[in-house]
């Protein structure tokens, strides 16, 4: 297949460098490649006698090039947004159908992601398992499931519970746990588990109180925290309802409590050897998990990831990635997190991706890298370093002291519920991106000084970045 890469003058050197031997290059009479129009391309092609099978225009180009395909006998498709991705695109031509609307690198990512999803779904359909909770496979060689806890659920309104359940579900939770405080009433437990079960399935209840667990049993698929303090009271009822139970070591040990659960006829049993916090027995507890799984591979294990990620001051996505690998290696079936603190926001989503990465890696017998999905958020797999030439003279930048008040007015910038607010004396603009807010501000003639516009653009960009990474934003303070 003969391929032609179309670009502008500024990117010529870089495009020729990366395309060497892979494709021909056509440089149009325009500085910026994204400004290439159908008319410019048509004029340039009319002067060439060669024929190509595929013409790749820059990924950022807009305009309809379809009428040129028939005239020149070649497909015209969007290439990547960055010249550095040209080799990847050309190497992928046999396995992907490029688009005239979406940049090629985005198309490749979509195909990779779709392939990953199909592989994961196929693996889960064929997976062996110990038992299921409302159709969700637990144990065996099924993917590790994510159990997300709603802490102190009885204190939340219906609206708050609906919002939390929707958030967990959209984040990838497989099971939602209803945490109930020990000072709650049985009616509180009954009410909240019944309501949550109407929104999502399967659900579990998390409390050591026998009266609270008993009130919840008719509405839940699983009970957490069963040990010698409550198993005698609850065992028969759990067996009668066919409810799954997570067994804790308690004071007399995990093996004895498991045996007691079996004696009561509880069939769906999950063991929790208890994961200890970092620097307080974490390694020993991992060994306990490994040894238990080695001797009881048929019993699913609950792995309390939150016991580690909530108790270490480190970015949670990296912590959850390595915890998922460790959990897999010690035989865990369920990853548990409460998302209690701001630093563990998005823990459910992170653990879901991590569990999928581990599953894919296990199927491919490889480390969890180059899978098509990842937890890279601030770091990158490849560096993008473009060649460029400077225009003389080279002037060193220098901040100017002081500022001039804008006669049109000043603004306060705030972030709330996933949106940015630009609040002035005459109006408030709300949006999700700095560009959208600045565009509307200019349209409304809400700024008259370049200096003021520059300041607002900086602060709004900080607000947008804070939103993206789930961090707090305070105007004029460092955010990220």
Image (cartoon, helix red, strand yellow):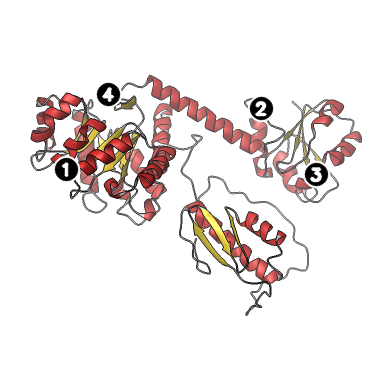
- Local crowd size for mark 1, using a 10 Å CA cut-off: few (<14), some (14–19), many (≥20): some
- Local crowd size for mark 2, using a 10 Å CA cut-off: few (<14), some (14–19), many (≥20): few
Q: Nearer the viewer, mark 2 or mark 1?
A: 1
Q: Which residue is mark 4?
A: 131
Q: Which mark is residue 36?
A: 3
Q: Which residue is nearer to you in this view: 330 or 99?
A: 99
Quadrant housing residue 268: top left
Residue 72 horizontal/vertical position (percent): 85, 28
Q: Which of the two labelled residues, at mark 2 and mark 1, occupies the earlier sequence position?
A: 2
Tell me the residue at 27%/38% (across/down).
193
Give how far apart the Cα atoms at labels 1 and 3 are.
67 Å
Q: Which of the two labelled residues, at mark 2 and mark 4, occupies the earlier sequence position?
A: 2
Q: Which mark is residue 208?
A: 1
Quadrant housing residue 239: top left
Tell me the residue at 38%/55% (across/down).
342
Mark 1 touching mark 4, by CB under 8 A? no
Secondary structure of residue under mark 4: strand
Residue 285 horizontal/vertical position (percent): 21, 43
Residue 220 horizontal/vertical position (percent): 26, 33
Secondary structure of residue under mark 3: loop
Q: Which of the two labelled residues, at mark 1 and mark 4, occupies the earlier sequence position?
A: 4
Give how far apart the Cα atoms at labels 2 and 1 are.
56 Å
Residue 280 horizontal/vertical position (percent): 22, 53
């Amino acid at each position: 297949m003969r391929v032609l890469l179309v670009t502008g003058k500024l990117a010529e050197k870089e495009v020729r460098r990366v395309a060497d031997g892979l494709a021909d290059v056509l440089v149009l009479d325009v500085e910026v490649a994204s400004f290439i129009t159908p008319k410019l391309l048509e004029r340039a092609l009319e002067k060439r006698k060669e024929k190509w099978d595929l013409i790749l225009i820059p990924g950022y180009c807009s305009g309809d090039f379809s009428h040129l395909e028939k005239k020149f006998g070649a497909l015209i498709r969007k290439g990547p947004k960055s010249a550095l991705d040209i080799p990847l695109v050309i190497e992928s031509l046999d396995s992907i159908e490029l688009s005239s609307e979406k940049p090629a690198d985005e198309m490749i990512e979509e195909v990779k992601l779709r392939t990953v999803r199909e592989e994961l779904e196929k693996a889960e359909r064929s997976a062996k398992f110990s038992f299921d909770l409302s159709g969700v496979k637990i144990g065996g060689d099924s993917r590790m499931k994510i159990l997300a806890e709603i802490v102190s659920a009885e204190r939340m309104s219906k609206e708050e519970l609906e919002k939390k359940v929707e958030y967990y579900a959209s984040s990838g939770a497989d099971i939602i746990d209803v945490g109930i405080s020990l000072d709650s009433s049985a009616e509180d437990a009954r009410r909240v588990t019944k309501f949550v079960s109407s929104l999502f399935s399967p659900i579990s209840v998390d409390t050591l109180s026998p009266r609270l667990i008993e009130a919840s049993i008719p509405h839940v698929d699983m009970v957490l925290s069963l040990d010698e303090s409550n198993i005698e009271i609850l065992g028969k009822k759990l067996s009668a309802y066919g409810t799954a139970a997570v067994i804790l070591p308690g004071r007399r040990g995990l093996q004895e409590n498991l045996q007691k659960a079996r004696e009561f006829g509880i069939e769906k049993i999950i063991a929790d050897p208890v994961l200890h916090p970092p620097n307080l027995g974490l390694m020993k507890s991992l060994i306990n998990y490994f040894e238990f799984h080695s001797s009881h591979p048929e019993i699913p294990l609950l792995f309390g990831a939150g016991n580690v990620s909530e108790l270490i001051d480190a970015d949670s996505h990296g912590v959850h990635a390595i915890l998922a690998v460790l959990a897999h290696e010690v035989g865990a079936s369920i990853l548990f997190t409460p998302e209690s603190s701001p630093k563990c926001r998005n823990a459910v989503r992170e653990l879901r991706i991590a569990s999928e990465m581990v599953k894919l890696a296990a199927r491919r017998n490889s480390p969890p890298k180059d899978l098509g999905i990842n937890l890279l958020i601030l770091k990158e797999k490849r560096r993008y370093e473009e060649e460029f030439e400077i225009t003389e003279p080279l002037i060193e930048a220098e901040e100017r002291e002081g500022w001039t008040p804008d006669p049109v007015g000043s603004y306060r910038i705030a972030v709330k519920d996933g949106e940015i607010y630009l609040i002035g004396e005459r109006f408030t603009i709300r949006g999700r991106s700095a560009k959208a807010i600045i565009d509307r501000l200019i349209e409304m003639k809400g700024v008259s000084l370049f200096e003021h516009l520059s300041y607002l653009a900086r602060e709004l960009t900080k607000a947008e970045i804070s939103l993206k990474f789930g961090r707090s934003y305070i105007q004029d303070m460092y955010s990220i």
